[in-house]
Image: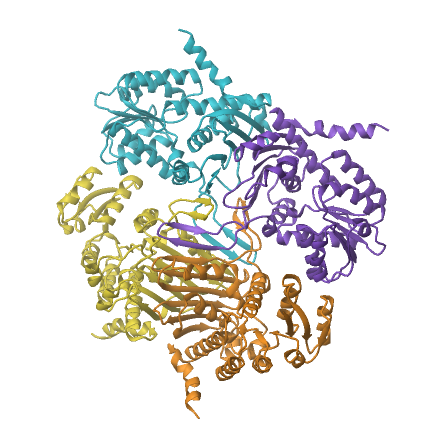
Chain colours: A yellow, B orange, C purple, D cyan
Amino acid sequence: MKIGLVGLGRVGKIHLGNLIQYFTETEVVIVSDPLEESHDFARKLGVDRIVFDAREVLMHPEVEAVIICAPTPFHIPYVKLAAENGKHIFCEKPLDVDLKAIAEARQVVAQNGVNLMVGFNRRFDDNFARVKALVASGKIGEPHLLKITSRDPAPPPLEYLEVSGGIFLDMTIHDFDMARFIVGSEVTEVYVKGGALINPEIAKFDDVDTAVTVLTFENGAIGVIDNSRKAVYGYDQRLEIFGSEGMARAENRHENDVVFSGKDGVSGALPLYFFLERYEKAFRACLKEFLTCVETGASSTVDAHDGLMATAIGKAAGISLAEGRPVAMNEVLAVLEQKAETP
Amino acid sequence: MKIGLVGLGRVGKIHLGNLIQYFTETEVVIVSDPLEESHDFARKLGVDRIVFDAREVLMHPEVEAVIICAPTPFHIPYVKLAAENGKHIFCEKPLDVDLKAIAEARQVVAQNGVNLMVGFNRRFDDNFARVKALVASGKIGEPHLLKITSRDPAPPPLEYLEVSGGIFLDMTIHDFDMARFIVGSEVTEVYVKGGALINPEIAKFDDVDTAVTVLTFENGAIGVIDNSRKAVYGYDQRLEIFGSEGMARAENRHENDVVFSGKDGVSGALPLYFFLERYEKAFRACLKEFLTCVETGASSTVDAHDGLMATAIGKAAGISLAEGRPVAMNEVLAVLEQKAETP
Amino acid sequence: MKIGLVGLGRVGKIHLGNLIQYFTETEVVIVSDPLEESHDFARKLGVDRIVFDAREVLMHPEVEAVIICAPTPFHIPYVKLAAENGKHIFCEKPLDVDLKAIAEARQVVAQNGVNLMVGFNRRFDDNFARVKALVASGKIGEPHLLKITSRDPAPPPLEYLEVSGGIFLDMTIHDFDMARFIVGSEVTEVYVKGGALINPEIAKFDDVDTAVTVLTFENGAIGVIDNSRKAVYGYDQRLEIFGSEGMARAENRHENDVVFSGKDGVSGALPLYFFLERYEKAFRACLKEFLTCVETGASSTVDAHDGLMATAIGKAAGISLAEGRPVAMNEVLAVLEQKAETP
Amino acid sequence: MKIGLVGLGRVGKIHLGNLIQYFTETEVVIVSDPLEESHDFARKLGVDRIVFDAREVLMHPEVEAVIICAPTPFHIPYVKLAAENGKHIFCEKPLDVDLKAIAEARQVVAQNGVNLMVGFNRRFDDNFARVKALVASGKIGEPHLLKITSRDPAPPPLEYLEVSGGIFLDMTIHDFDMARFIVGSEVTEVYVKGGALINPEIAKFDDVDTAVTVLTFENGAIGVIDNSRKAVYGYDQRLEIFGSEGMARAENRHENDVVFSGKDGVSGALPLYFFLERYEKAFRACLKEFLTCVETGASSTVDAHDGLMATAIGKAAGISLAEGRPVAMNEVLAVLEQKAETP
């Protein structure tokens, strides 16, 4: 399979390295990045053609599948261009912050009959995939309660937070996707309670750094997500689903499994520091899923609809926080139906 | 110290047994229960005087302190009578389901200068007491997020549920007390999402068996309680508090610490079955606290105000569930101020 | 059932308290202790007759079963006297340090048709009992490897160590019994490697404070016990059995299940301090087993043979340490056969 | 740095992949393998020169450092040839089964002033490296007891076992190196108890499949290794070191951290299956250590002496098993001194 890759930032480099070492049945024929200093990385890994313009990749005649790791504002236009050129597409998350734009891109993808996979790589984490398998097998019975803990080790700089789109589209969006994935049912209502408890400055952007989000699902299950921008002990990624027949819990992962027992107590390792360490294998597994889907012609398991819904829940959360009330998903999704009715 | 005990039900028996074996510096001079078949238990433990009428205990001239384990509707009248007779009082929870009645009893207790301790014994559980100590010592810094999981192994019969006062006053009330205890700040707002997911029948009583409750605290912290009436794996009592300097988690307790590793996986023990097993030592520690307070003249650490607030939060939760909106505690507590203003 | 108890030391008090609170179907009719200051404890628990002379208990006409908690040198004579008077006997461990003396007492017990149970209470610990059940059910298949970790929080005073009979008869004897119990097969050979690593002074008594003992079992399994007189983090009591179909591990027990995560790491509670805390429930369960056997007429599950073998393995360990070689159990047990041959 | 690699078996492929993806500052200029079908793997990773003859690699004028992953019998001759050609050497373990041959190679390495690192990659496992750090920092105080559990998921075929050199040189050798590494002191005596408990057939080769090895260290510490060729639950790699100030334990690693709680119990994941999964990151860290040593001119932390001692302890274990007695290391190492004396 001949592959093109767009964007050699942090995540683009991970995908390229994985393609070279682990997916030797593929060939990366072209890579693009607007910054020259990034080209060296690809060169050392033996990529022959490295260009500045993403469109050269997206329209390259030999390329069958593209990996899009450009900044978020470019996702939708690049996805459309790739689809129109008949390429299968792996696109980093989030697809976009605008629901209509995502819906349009979804249509273009469908019209061109290509595969679009959104890079919600956490679904492929060993822990979360195992929980999903337990739920899917019926081991927990009917899902009743979902709990997700998702905390970062440290907040990004204020300048970033100002333009991030808010905690729900920037950070919790991963948890919204995870919630839908694990419960296997659509969210119907969102309620948020949040605060600027770590840094009061961010209240200026009408944003919060600590939040509890309650999700109601179509199948009756109730979900809770707790977020913090700053866990002093490191990245905290846990999940628990409780149902009529049992409970599955995914614990946090740690640097090692060594326990020291001394006269003052028993102590163990800190968690793996952040998402690059924690999800190292998940990035690889996610890419593998995409390559397998392309090869076998199977539909992507994480598609445009998933990308759309994660963003939509984020929108609802923002309204709930601002207005202090539960928000029905229909309220947020109405914008799409209006459009559909328009012509 | 001379002690009288009212009520030889399940919990009354536990207190009596503990008094006899572990608190040998006290003397149980009189015990009452309206049912003759209960008297035998006390007789075997060597109690000399066993009567049918609680008032004989509450007014006994030699008795310095009373343990009230009668059914909830008797709590307030017995507390008042004991206070008026100058006895120190240990009363099982909940004090009552009516806020005004609790407030009145509180006044009588204060006027008579006696100690009243409410039997929120979970505060004295080894796990939760340890978490409280970590919070109190400043180890977790400013509290940001509180998570309580509280699930019963099996729901009570429908007939009981019909008259129980609802899940929030019957079951979650313990968690409301725990929440205030751990965070060390008053609750200002309550939001509930619930469902009759285990047995749809209970929806007839406008009750739920599965609930997520979001609490907002005066100090800015946000709390989440998740409840289920039926955890097939047994009693589930966990707690987590996350703050600016760290997190403390109390895990569930299990029957044993044995792990079996076989070709199909690794397996361990179920949790301790229910509150009698789980809180066996906490009952004892709670009673010890009361006896120490009486002996030293110190104020009770779990007093009438605590009893009142737990019930008040339960009321707010009921309103939130019924009306689908966040409810401010002031709205519920207003009934007390009105009364104060009345005359 | 009418019971008499001999000896109100630390363990005698535990048994008496348990009899009064938990085994209300029994009646303690008489208790003895040579020291007057101990009598008060029994008096407060409502025992009517408290005497100085153990023989009054052992020969008391109403007593059906006796609990012997006197110092070790009195065990054998008291066991014999009780047996000759037709009492069922619960005797604290070790029965004695002399194999012949134990064998003789065993004969007297058998001749009088009474039950003798040796108080190896660790067998009734929730953890170890669970491991035994897993082994007995065949879940681990054929046992191949047994590992016991047994470490005390602090060494006894040197004066005690001088007369203790050495680490193997004083401390490891519990582990020898546990090893036989768990594997369900007799020990055939013992090899020891030890050192005076904590306090070189004890080498003067030809004793060690740190030891690794390798046991060979009749069924082919190999066992390892590691002992230390001083684990700075507290009492350490673990066990692991590995077989053809799986492994069962009993972890150490801790004061609580709270984990604190801060910027410097993750920390938890210390173990339960020592045997009184750790085996509190096991003492009760062990006593219950005895009472049940007496009531139903069943044979004791921990009998004189068990008491004999634990002491015999301790003897073999001492020889191995002294001579630096593996010692066959036959070599130690030969002393009994000689006696049997001497008509 | 220009690198040559010899041998494209399972481990050779791992090293080559790691060199290409993770150590991009190095250049693999030549690779050899006698089997043509292996060459394709290297070609896909972009290696330009792939040959059949190892000597072309070991003598290649541009190569500065070689990675030797050939079968064990070739280790010593290849190490010598590489050293004589001035190459730094990374060689897979074991160096050899003959002590004299290792000693000779060590001399050649020393004479040519090159670095030799033996691939005891387990030292670089996150868990074991953390334990070593705790020991080295003095946190555990004086080491008293070392316990290593090392069990394979399944035995190799009988044909392999027949020629493997026995369990001690084939399997336990890794644990012998780990023991020396963790305790930081030389082994002075070895005692083994073993059995053919999994497959009696292997007794024909005077070998065992289950073994307990007791090691005595120069500093007084006592170590125990327990081995099994077949743990039905998977690869089991644990370690515990206990000292005067505390204990460090490295637990086994599992496929995931998900726990399922159902009505029949609580269950978790199996361990990572075997060494390729378990030590994936350790292979990389070990290689990094070598490359760093070569670059900075530092001595290897795992050198020829380490390779020699691991083999020597294995020899002693074999003698102990055969003769049923403790064996002093001096007895085994004497063969080297004899040689030294023979001028």
Examine the image and state in which quarter residue B340 appears.
Answer: bottom left
Residue C71 located left or right of residue D236: right
Task: Point out residue A17 in the picture as x, y percentages from the top left corner.
Answer: 26, 42
Of D322 and C125, nearer the camera is: C125
Vertical arrangement, residue A308 with respect to residue D310, above or below = below
Task: Point out residue A99 in the picture as x, y percentages from the top left corner.
Answer: 25, 67
Vertical arrangement, residue D218 with respect to residue A157, above or below = above
Question: What quarter of the picture does the C terminus of chain A occupy?
Answer: bottom left
Task: Point out residue D176 in the picture as x, y percentages from the top left corner.
Answer: 46, 29
Residue with the most extreme top position: D343
Question: What quarter of the picture does the N terminus of chain A occupy?
Answer: top left
Q: Residue at x 79, y 40 (%)?
A: C106
Residue D146 located left or right of residue C161: left
Task: Point out residue B53 in the picture as x, y percentages from the top left corner.
Answer: 68, 80
Q: Residue at x 61, y 31 (%)?
A: C205
Residue C311 located left or right of residue B202: right
Of C178 and A68, nearer the camera is: C178
Number of disc labels? 0
Report if residue B68 is visible in the image.
Answer: no
